[in-house]
């Protein structure tokens, strides 16, 4: 009998350790790090697509004058002035630094507070028309997308935004 135990008393039992070991904590931290590394690129791509979506309403400002020019004269405006729009660097928002018209195509240049993946990149929206039927409404082709059948896509595609970051209708 140990000397610390007296008759009719129980000997003190060592208490079991409570809490987590260092190895268990490191495993939890490693799992969280792996999960965040998997989720981060998806989140960043979503942020970029959101910035593109916020930029497109600026292009909508130019669509109507371009469509009116086509239906009236069957020609596309050569530049912002011919479309009746302000200078390219005057059409801006949080993510867009300029909206340029060139031969009917709308070129949205990203800048200002745009994500690093979009900074100084361009997204083009080009008009698609039926050349011998000016009453047919102008359709718009976004980025790298193909034009509709039986329509002629006007203007140059200057899209430099990576295809993986474009909205689905622009690929």
Image (cartoon, grey):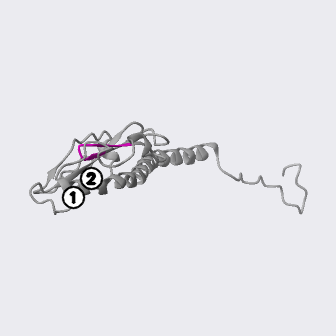
Residue drawn 71% across the image and 51% down it: 17
Q: Compared to 72, does 105 lie above or below?
A: above
User: For mark 2, what is the residue?
Assistant: 66
Q: Secondary structure at mark 1?
A: loop
- Residue neighbourhood size for the residue with mark 1, other residues' Cα within 10 Å, grouped as few (<14), some (14–19), many (≥20): many
Query: Which stretch did the figure color magenta?
Result: 99-106
Q: Overall secondary structure of the magenta stretch?
A: strand
Residue drawn 25% across the image and 57% down it: 68
| Disc on res. 103 | none
Q: Is residue 141 left or right of residue 87?
A: left
| Disc on res. 138 | 1
Q: Is residue 10 left or right of residue 165?
A: right
Residue drawn 46% across the image and 42% down it: 115
Q: Look at the numbered discs 2 and 1 and tell me whether their residues touch, using CB distance below 8 Å.
A: yes
Q: Residue 57 at what x, y percent from top left? A: 39, 55
Let me know if residue 52 appears in the view.
yes
Q: Compared to 79, does 148 lie above or below?
A: below
Residue drawn 10% across the image and 57% down it: 150
Q: Is residue 18 left or right of residue 67?
A: right
- Residue neighbourhood size for the residue with mark 2, other residues' Cα within 10 Å, grouped as few (<14), some (14–19), many (≥20): many
Q: Residue 7 at what x, y percent from top left? A: 90, 60
* Foreground of the two, 136 or 113: 136
Please tell me in which quadrant of the rendered image residue 122 appears: top left
Q: Residue 12 at what x, y percent from top left? A: 83, 55
* Foreground of the two, 5 or 16: 16
User: Any magenta on residue 92?
Assistant: no
Q: Secondary structure at mark 2?
A: helix
Q: Residue 60 at what x, y percent from top left? A: 35, 55
For marks 2 and 1, the one nearer the N-term is 2
């Amino acid at each position: 009998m140990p000397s610390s135990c007296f008759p009719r008393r129980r000997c003190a039992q060592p208490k079991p350790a409570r809490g987590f070991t260092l190895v268990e904590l490191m495993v939890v931290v490693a799992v969280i790090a792996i999960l965040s590394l998997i989720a981060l690129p998806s989140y960043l791509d979503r942020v970029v697509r959101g910035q593109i979506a916020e930029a497109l309403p600026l292009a909508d400002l130019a669509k109507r004058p371009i469509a009116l020019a086509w239906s009236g004269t069957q020609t596309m405006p050569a530049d912002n002035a011919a479309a009746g729009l302000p200078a390219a660097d005057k059409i801006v928002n949080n993510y867009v630094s300029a909206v340029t018209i060139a031969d009917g195509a709308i070129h949205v240049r990203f800048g200002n507070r745009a994500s690093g993946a979009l900074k100084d990149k361009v997204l083009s929206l080009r008009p698609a028309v039926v050349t011998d039927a000016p009453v047919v409404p102008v359709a718009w082709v976004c980025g790298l997308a193909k034009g509709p059948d039986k329509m002629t896509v006007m203007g140059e595609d200057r899209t430099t935004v990576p295809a993986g970051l474009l909205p689905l209708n622009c690929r």
